[in-house]
Image (cartoon, grey):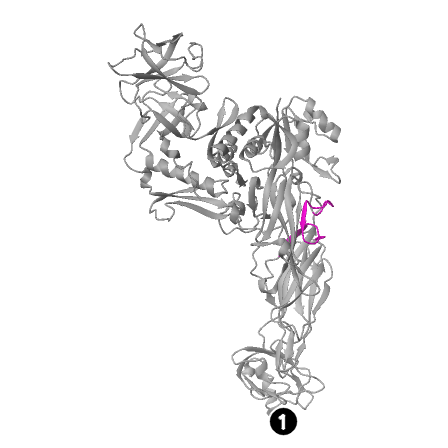
Amino acid sequence: MTKTVTITRDVFDRSSWQQHEVEDVADFLALNVGRWSGDRRHWSWPENTRLYHRAFAQDCDVTPSDRCDLEALNAFPGPFFLEQRPGSWQDVASVLLAPFYALLGLLVPKPAALNQNVNSSNNQLGDRQNKARLLGRIPDIFGEKRSTPDDLMVPLRIFDSSGNESELSYFGVSRGELDVSDIRDGDTLVSEIEGETVEVYAPFTSPNSGDDPQLRVGNPIGMGVVTVLKSNGINGQTLYPPNYKSYTSDATAPVLRFRYPNFIISTDDDNLNFTKFAEAGAGIVLSGAHADDGSGHVVNLDGSYTIDTVSNAEMTLVSPASVNSDWTIVNAMASHQTPVIPSCTLDASGLTTKVVGPVIVDDATVTGAIANLVQPGGSFKTDGSDSFPVAVTVRFGVTPVDASGAPTGPEVTTDITLPGSGVDKTQRAASAALTLSGRSSLRAWRTTPTDYFYKGTVTDEIKWRDLFATAPVAMEDFGNITTMLSLTRVTPTALGVKERKLTALVCRRVAVRDGDGFLDTLAASKNAADVFCALALDPYNGRRSLAELNVAQIYDTVAAVGAYFGDTSVMEFGFSFDDDQMPAEEELTSVAQAIFCTALRRGAVLELVFESETPDSSMLFNHRNKLPGSEKRTMRFGALKDYDGVELNYVDSGNFDAAATYRIPTDGSAGNPQKIDTVGVRNFRPAAWLAWRAYWKSQLQRLAVEFDATEQAAVVAQSERILNADNTRPGTQDGEVIDQDGLALTLSRKPIFAPETDYLIMLQIPDGTVDVISIVPGPSPKTVLLAEAPSSSLSIEIRNAARAAYWIVPDIDTDLGRAFLVAEKTPNDAATYKLSVINYDRRYYQNDTIDPV
């Protein structure tokens, strides 16, 4: 007996409530609420989450405190209400199918708007990339397919002591247990990539749990999952040297003097060549330009000026006296100039500061940061024949700040030096590990000057490329999700352009069939029968009970599909369900359609109906089970919508699930092809057979009929063959069977027999089939005599929901106007359905027996 468990985020907002029908309340809550710890023999209930029995009331609170309390819940009749209060979301996220990012608590950059229906790359036919899907549904992979897992963590890039860069990434593959193989980065096996490692973690384990991975390719990573926040404010800014476009005179050998009205003079242009750092029209800042005028008065020429002209030994300024009047005093000094001035600085950089920052890390949980520095062209100087390394030191300052940005403690500085190389003239890089304690302000500046006056070439540009703030993640595992941790060595040539394309061939492990039920044992399977049943029974997808599945019929039907085509690939399915708007009915329908079937509920039981050439019809529709005046018939004299071909898209399992298209004609010459996207089809032959069926249906449809039917239509499946009496014109002989006496049937209407004409009667049988039997007139006006007995007893009791329908037609060798395929069925209300049907033609299936290879 099932019991209802209702999960709610807001007791006052019923739209937030989610209902689950479960048979074992304790198991449901143990698997989906709270979490396991250690060896998972211990179970903990999440804080701020309460469980009520029958009603939201304190005296109905049955929140379990331990495993014994949990088991005792099965004795209660229900219903149960699980109240998720603020602060409890991390522990009940798996029940609510919350996004990976809330489940993990991993920081990602905040977008301006969140799209809650972003599908994963698993189902994209091209340009698949590992990417984050904020507020997206956890992928549910069923069957076998190549997965492009979702980013669960901002990729963390870090350089080792040798300057080699690695990227740590964490990915979510799918809910549930998987077999994982053939892990690739791009098109290359990870096992063939030097320095790359991938670890696969089964559900309820993670790099933080202490459990070994389910699968490891490469060397152990030895790192856990951390919260990562990448700063958008740091994106490769150059850290300029302190003497960038500037010069400070040496007090021991001064070479700088000023002459009226606007000259700056270098007395040694070998050591001070103005063209090395200044240019006409640029600004220049003088500081320390102080000289004695000979009478004890100090002339101060400091200020910000504009450069007029520049040569090796001489620079002129634009009207300096208008900026600083002390320039007029220089005119009265000897030779109209100052003496050589020690310790004077000329700064023509135009920068008010050479410090990058501050950057605010606005998170109270962060404990550290990784700052990445790169020298794109290396760090060396050369005179054309010899090269020498140039070491560059960068200083980082970290200051704790409050919400307003005001410091709450002193700045702590950390220096990091890149040694350079005179041999290796490619990129040099290093990472600085910084300590943070909550909200902090970070800045960086270069302390090593550039040798602008070296008689050769100096290459020592350094950039602050990345800033990652990090915080520990306390959760030991992340629920019933298969995840992957990767550590990838990034080569300098790939820096900045490498796209993450980590993929793996995965197959969902589902319950093993045991007669009409299933074992607790799980095994990987891509058989559509296994997938269909697993989806139907899954508590977050179909949510059906075992009693609602005709297990034997489902497996027999899938086996019949394989036997019919003589190819087991038609029995396979592989897809990632990741759209939170897709209902369970659509999921089950997609599995059925991939294997040429239709999912059907007969009463309360799910079954599969295989569409194939057949002489038998499942139901007869006549004026007794159609609404009067609802039938409309359309005759067509050309192809449907003038289609002259088909383009059917699928994924090619033999080519890493790359996008593939089967075309009819195969040379792609169709001008107006019917375009079809498939779900779960990963093999060439099934795709081809599906395409040919669609092609022949578009070419051979001649009669389309729409009508409203009574509730008897509930048991009819799409693509099922039916019989439909033409009730758009008079003279149609149809109705109900009133009575049966042996082979004599009493009908609701008097039949009319033309002379020298043989007739057939079509009879609705209760088991969902239609008998077609030859008849002759009976002894009374409303009776007919059957040539043979019906295959089953007819429904003739007046108390039955429906009596046996009949239709009498001349015995002619044609199905046109009589046999139809159900193209679409939609409910009008609780008691009627609208059916759209097309003429049945055995030629729809003429390519089923032709190997398309």
Q: Quadrant of residue 304?
A: bottom right
| 254 shown above or below 63 | below
Residue 806 pos. (x, y %): 36, 16
Residue 736 pos. (x, y %): 37, 13
The majority secondary structure of the magenta stretch comes to loop
Q: Is 210 included in the stretch rendered in magenta?
A: yes
State left or right for residue 166 relative to residue 14: right
Amino acid type for the residue under numbered disc 1: Ala
**Which residue occupies the foreground of this view, 239 or 835?**
835
**For the magenta stretch, what is the residue range?**
207-230
Residue identifier under label 1: 334
Residue 118 shows in the view: no
**Which residue occupies the foreground of this view, 519 or 332?**
519
State left or right for residue 86 relative to residue 780: right
Outermost residue, bottom direction? 335
Residue 673 shows in the view: yes
Q: Quadrant of residue 91?
A: top right
Callout 1 environment at 10 Å: few (<14), some (14 to 19), or many (20+)? few
**Which residue occupies the foreground of this view, 473 or 380?**
380
Q: Tag 1, which secondary structure?
A: helix
Quarter of the image with the C terminus in it: top left
Q: Quadrant of residue 84?
A: top right
State left or right for residue 804 relative to residue 422: left
The residue sitting at 64% across, 23% down in the picture is 78
Quarter of the image with the N terminus in it: top right
Q: Is 556 included in the stretch rendered in magenta?
A: no
Q: How many marks?
A: 1
Outermost residue, top direction? 779
Residue 598 pos. (x, y %): 46, 31
Residue 776 pos. (x, y %): 31, 11
State left or right for residue 187 relative to residue 210: left
| 246 shown above or below 794 | below
